[in-house]
């Protein structure tokens, strides 16, 4: 039995490996680490002269906190998105006039455009 400490995704494991078969020890194989692309954050996009407010996670729209066409300030709550039985307040990312792209009861995916602020 050979004993090893192995790290997988930052978690340490202690393993024992039994050698079977050949009388000659196996040669160690080294593999080059695979490059992983970092996830790109969803950035608000400008569409029609406005800044998009995007869903940070998939969920259902529970409430629109302001009226369509209302003036909003950056950081003001504009809607509530329910995800995994938790209510998440989504806030305005800029000052301006809001136009919603969703309605109460809509199910949205992560990165979906919820509203535009001009």
Image (tube, rainbow, N blue to C red):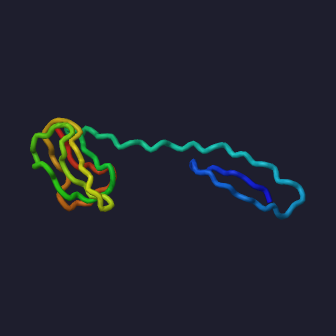
> Horizontal and vertical percent for residue 89?
24, 50
**Residue 33 vs residue 81: left or right?**
right
> Horizontal and vertical percent for residue 81?
25, 55
Q: Nearer the viewer, residue 112 or 66?
A: 66
Residue drawn at x 72%, y 53% is 4
Q: Quadrant of residue 24?
A: bottom right
Residue drawn at x 58%, y 51% is 11
**Residue 52 vs residue 35: left or right?**
left
> Horizontal and vertical percent for residue 62?
20, 59
Quadrant placement of the N terminus: bottom right
Image mark count:
0
> Horizontal and vertical percent for residue 108?
28, 57
Residue drawn at x 21%, y 39% is 75
Residue drawn at x 54%, y 44% is 36
**Residue 110 vs residue 89: left or right?**
right
Q: Nearer the viewer, residue 51 or 72?
A: 72
Q: Nearer the viewer, residue 8 or 106?
A: 8
Residue 45 versus residue 61 in the image, above or below? above
Q: Is residue 6 visible?
A: yes
Q: Is residue 49 visible?
A: no
Residue that sits furthest to the right in the current view: 23
Quadrant placement of the C terminus: top left
């Amino acid at each position: 039995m050979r004993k090893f400490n192995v790290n997988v995704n930052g978690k340490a494991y202690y393993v024992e490996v039994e050698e079977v078969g050949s009388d000659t020890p196996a040669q160690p194989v080294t593999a080059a680490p695979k490059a992983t692309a970092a996830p790109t954050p969803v950035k608000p996009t400008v569409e029609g002269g406005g800044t998009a407010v995007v869903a940070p996670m998939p969920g259902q729209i529970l409430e629109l906190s302001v009226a369509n066409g209302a003036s909003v300030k950056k950081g003001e709550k504009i809607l509530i998105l329910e995800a995994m039985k938790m209510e998440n307040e989504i806030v305005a990312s800029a000052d301006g006039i809001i136009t919603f792209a969703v309605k109460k009861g809509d199910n949205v995916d992560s990165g979906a455009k919820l509203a535009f602020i001009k």
